[in-house]
Image (cartoon, helix red, strand yellow):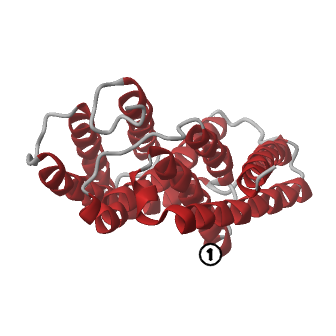
């Protein structure tokens, strides 16, 4: 078995075990199980890093023209942000989204082998970092906002109903912690999404000689940006907190995922990974 195949199997197994064990550890309130899950996902992350390095080492800039490389890297970025948050803020709940999402994106990338992305080669490097890189980071922050919002709504409902917090709920952070996580995800994510969107229109000008091409991805991305901008404004300027902010952050994430799945896989578009 070739090294790449060994790495693919190892990454898949470690991410899958990490996801399952973390959920099991959370539901059973077993901290040791969650630590094992974090270590397994961490080992998968190391193998994933090696896998991407070997891919880049063998293909160089040409790897940026491969649709499956983009998804593969997005999975790596999602998990990287989780570990940074875990290390800096001691927040472990984002693992509920990070590990399963990293696994899903990695497996999706394996199923897209050989697909190409249309891009002027001279601009592949800088625009990959600016356009794709910023959008990946923004989506990763949105994933964290989604989990923080979902847990906020669940915990808030239990508290308002004056139900006794049992099981994993006893170990959850406070509502304020979830709200702050949501706030910071929006604070960092929206400027990144804006930068990614603007660089995408510039990219279109070089690739298709039109800044606005009428591509479905453009329209969907603008709609998502408008929702994201409204959330950003309401949180920072109007002081939105709690349920409204949680629901809107979750909505923006869901639209972003639908955009990625429907447009990039199912619709005729410049961004279709199946072309």
Q: Residue at x 42, y 44 (%)?
A: 249
Q: Is residue 236 left or right of residue 211?
A: right
Q: Is residue 244 left or right of residue 113?
A: left
Using the rendered view, name the quadrant where residue 122 is placed: bottom left
Query: What residue would you read off at disc 1?
Result: 88
Taking depth in this image into account, of 28 and 112 the one nearest to the observer is 112
Q: Is residue 238 visible?
A: no
Report the quarter where the C terminus lies: top left
Q: In the image, residue 46 lies at what x, y percent?
A: 72, 66
> Please, is residue 262 above or below residue 175 in the view?
above
Would residue 156 be found to the left or right of residue 92 on screen?
Answer: left
Query: Where residue 105 sits: x, y (%)?
Result: 58, 43
Q: Quadrant of residue 265?
A: top left
At 75% from the left and 55% from the top, the residue drawn is: 7
Give the SS element for disc 1.
Answer: helix
Q: Residue furthest bottom?
A: 88
């Amino acid at each position: 078995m070739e090294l790449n195949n060994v790495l693919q199997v190892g990454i898949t197994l470690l991410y899958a075990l990490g996801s399952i064990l973390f959920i099991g550890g959370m539901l059973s309130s077993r901290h040791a199980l969650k630590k094992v899950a974090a270590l397994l996902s961490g080992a998968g992350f190391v193998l994933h890093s090696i896998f991407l390095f070997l891919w880049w080492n063998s293909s160089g800039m040409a790897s940026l023209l491969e649709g499956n490389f983009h998804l593969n890297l997005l999975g790596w970025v999602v998990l990287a942000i989780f570990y940074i948050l875990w290390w800096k803020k001691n927040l472990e709940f984002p693992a509920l989204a990070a590990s399963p999402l990293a696994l899903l994106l990695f497996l999706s990338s394996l199923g897209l082998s050989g697909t190409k992305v249309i891009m002027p080669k001279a601009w592949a490097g800088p625009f990959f970092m600016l356009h794709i890189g910023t959008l990946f980071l923004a989506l990763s922050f949105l994933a964290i906002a989604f989990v923080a919002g979902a847990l906020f709504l669940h915990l808030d409902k239990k508290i308002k109903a004056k139900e006794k917090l049992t099981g994993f709920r006893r170990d959850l952070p406070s509502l304020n912690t979830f709200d702050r996580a949501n706030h910071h995800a929006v604070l960092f994510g929206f400027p990144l999404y804006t930068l990614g969107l603007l660089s995408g229109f510039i990219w279109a000008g070089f690739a298709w000689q039109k800044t606005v091409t009428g591509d479905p991805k453009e329209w969907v991305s603008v709609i998502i940006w408008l929702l994201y901008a409204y959330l950003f404004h309401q949180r920072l300027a109007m002081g939105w907190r709690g349920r409204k902010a949680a629901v809107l952050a979750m909505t923006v994430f869901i639209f972003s995922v639908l955009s990625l799945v429907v447009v990039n896989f199912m619709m005729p578009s410049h961004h279709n990974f199946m072309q």
